[in-house]
Image (cartoon, grey):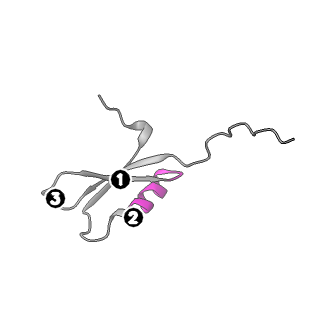
Amino acid sequence: MTQPQSPSSDTQWPRWEVFKKDNDRRPYQAVGSVHAGDPQHALITARNIFVRRPAAVSLWVVREDDILAA
């Protein structure tokens, strides 16, 4: 008889929230999120997913755990 396996630890990379600025006159906008192992990987992944047309002038990635909200 096979016993159910215990839940394993979470193996998913951390979630990073992505903020994009389309031009210098516009504010940053939250555009989505990505999962990545480190900040550089998150930025590259975000650029590949969220920066198509129009091109962004700036892109931020912030680890979800570092965002405080009230």
Q: CA distance from mark 2 to mark 1?
A: 9 Å
Residue shown at the point (26%, 64%) measured from the top left: 56
Helix, strand or loop at label 2? It is helix
Which residue bears the numbered disc 3? Answer: 24
Report the number of numbered marks: 3
Helix, strand or loop at label 3? It is loop
Q: CA distance from mark 2 to mark 3?
A: 21 Å
Task: Name the spot of residue 42 as percent of width and height, x first.
Answer: 45, 55
Asked if disc 2 and disc 1 are in contact, CB closer than 8 Å, the reply is: yes
| Residue mark closest to the camera, 2 vs 3 | 2
Name the amino acid type tagged 1.
Answer: Gly
Name the amino acid type tagged 2.
Answer: Ile
Residue shown at the point (62%, 46%) measured from the top left: 11
Name the amino acid type tagged 3.
Answer: Asp
Q: Which residues are magenta?
A: 36-47
**In front of the other: 40 or 69:** 69
Image position of 59 (left or right of 7): left
Q: Residues within 10 Å of mark 3 (few under 14, many from 20)?
A: few
For the C terminus, the image quarter is top left
Helix, strand or loop at label 1? It is strand
Q: CA distance from mark 1 to mark 3?
A: 20 Å
Task: Name the spot of residue 38 as percent of width and height, x first.
Answer: 51, 51
Residue 34 among those drawn in magenta: no
Q: Main secondary structure of the magenta part?
A: helix
Asked if disc 2 and disc 3 are in contact, CB closer than 8 Å, the reply is: no
Asked if disc 1 and disc 3 are in contact, CB closer than 8 Å, the reply is: no
Image position of 5 (left or right of 12): right
Task: Name the spot of residue 50 as percent of width and height, x first.
Answer: 34, 63
**In front of the other: 24 or 10:** 10
Residue shown at the point (46%, 51%) measured from the top left: 39
Task: Name the spot of residue 52 as percent of width and height, x first.
Answer: 31, 70
Which residue bears the numbered disc 2? Answer: 49
